[in-house]
């Protein structure tokens, strides 16, 4: 009797000892394999929260800019000869977004479509309050922290996508976007519509924002695909789409890469086909979101786009975005969409 009792006590003591030993070993190896300063790491969950807040700050600037003098300047012409405008609202949004992030995470690499004017009114943006509740996005508080090396992270921001349409009063196409890429792979995308204000996000391998529409796959859509193309340079891309996908294809045009990707995400279109050169800040957020909902964005050669900071900001030759049946739509395209000029 007594013997059994002793054994039980010993077993318990043994277990505790082994457990403590394990903890000590774990702690020792843990600290020895991470000799770096804590500030070399960044929590992706915090970057997501900050991104939501800065796209919304940018969106406010864009909305305020609408009722002010736009001060439209030209950044030149696109390859297709379309005027590429920039307004004071682009800069105001850039300042709010870029310095909102930089003043929160000084070591973070942020690439913006616009360049900063170094005046204090641009630079002096309040840091993001990471504890602030985000109405509609409180699901984030239930997600796990994820620490990554800050040197591996590149954030791409577009302070005002569809500037041309903004100057024309076509506000529905306008978005502000932020995207987190790790070693060049787009992981978190955040797209905000200022008119009316609403924000969507996707964290690849985790989940999309709760407001993301659920869309079911329809096999028959392949027979009559709905394709969306660029409003400012549709070029021959509608012709290419009809030729590739058959006479029952319907082609619509819309503005803003962010807007168009979201229309594929929400099932309004099956395919977004872009034939000309496009910049990575236009694509990155949508790329992360479409991946989060198991869709794809590739070049028309089927290659993934690399968003590392040292890569070329331009993607040439065309891109294809689908939520379903990517390989099907890719295989039907010609090898080159040489439709520019
Ligand atoms: C993207 O390119 C960078 C170099 O520019 C490279 O280090 C990185 O591994 C690439 N990422 C992918 C996913 O290929
Ligand atoms: C998709 O988004 C567009 C524009 O925001 C909206 O008009 C449309 O109703 C949405 N469709 C779905 C299925 O959510």
Image: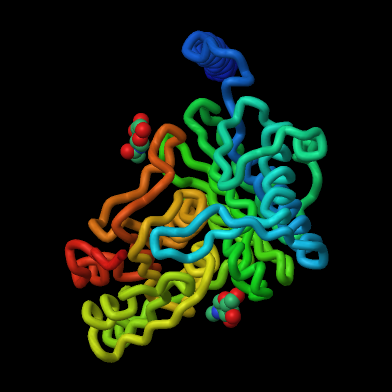
Question: Above or below — where is 157 with respect to 70?
Answer: above
Q: In which quarter of the image is ligand 2?
A: bottom right
Q: Which colour scheme is used?
A: rainbow
Question: Above or below — where is 9 with respect to 303?
Answer: above
- The spot of residue 222 in percent (x, y) is 29, 81
Q: Which of 132 and 305 is in front in this view?
A: 305
On-image quarter of the N terminus: top right
Residue at x 72% of width, y 43% of height: 95
Residue at x 61% of width, y 34% of height: 43
Residue at x 48% of width, y 41% of height: 181
- The spot of residue 92 in percent (x, y) is 74, 49
- The spot of residue 205 in percent (x, y) is 46, 50
Question: Above or below — where is 174 with respect to 243?
Answer: above
Q: Which of 327 and 334 is in front in this view?
A: 334
Count of residue discs: 0
Residue at x 36% of width, y 69% of height: 273
Q: Nearer the viewer, residue 18 or 97?
A: 97
Specify the quadrant of the image occupied by residue 177.
bottom right
């Amino acid at each position: 009797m007594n013997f059994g009792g002793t054994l039980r006590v010993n077993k318990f003591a043994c277990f505790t000892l082994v457990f403590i030993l394990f903890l000590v070993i774990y702690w020792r190896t843990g600290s020895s394999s991470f000799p770096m300063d804590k500030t070399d790491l960044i929590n992706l969950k915090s970057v997501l929260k900050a991104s939501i807040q800065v796209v919304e700050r940018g969106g406010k600037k864009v909305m305020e800019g609408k009722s002010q003098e736009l001060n439209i300047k030209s950044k030149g012409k696109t390859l297709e000869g379309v005027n590429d405008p920039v307004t004071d609202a682009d800069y105001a949004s850039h300042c709010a977004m870029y310095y909102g992030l930089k003043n929160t995470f000084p070591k973070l690499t942020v690439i913006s479509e616009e360049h900063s004017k170094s005046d204090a009114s641009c630079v002096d943006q309040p840091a993001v309050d990471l504890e602030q509740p985000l109405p509609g996005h409180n699901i984030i508080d239930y997600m796990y922290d994820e620490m990554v090396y800050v040197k591996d992270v590149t954030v791409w921001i577009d302070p005002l996508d569809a500037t041309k349409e903004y100057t024309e009063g076509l506000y529905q196409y306008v978005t502000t976007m932020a995207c987190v890429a790790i070693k060049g792979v787009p992981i978190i995308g955040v797209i905000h519509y200022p008119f009316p204000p609403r924000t969507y996000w996707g964290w690849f391998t985790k989940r999309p924002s709760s407001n993301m529409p659920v869309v079911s796959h329809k096999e028959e859509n392949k027979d009559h695909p709905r394709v969306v193309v660029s409003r400012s340079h549709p070029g021959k891309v509608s012709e290419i789409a009809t030729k590739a996908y058959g006479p029952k294809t319907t082609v619509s045009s819309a503005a803003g890469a962010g807007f168009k990707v979201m229309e594929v995400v929400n099932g309004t279109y099956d395919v977004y086909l872009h034939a000309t050169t496009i910049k990575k800040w236009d694509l990155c957020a949508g790329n992360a979101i479409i991946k989060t909902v198991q869709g794809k964005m590739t070049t028309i050669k089927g290659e993934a786009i690399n968003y590392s900071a040292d890569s070329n900001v331009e993607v040439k030759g065309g891109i294809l975005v689908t939520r379903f049946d990517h390989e099907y739509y890719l295989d039907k395209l010609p090898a080159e969409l040489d439709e520019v000029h």
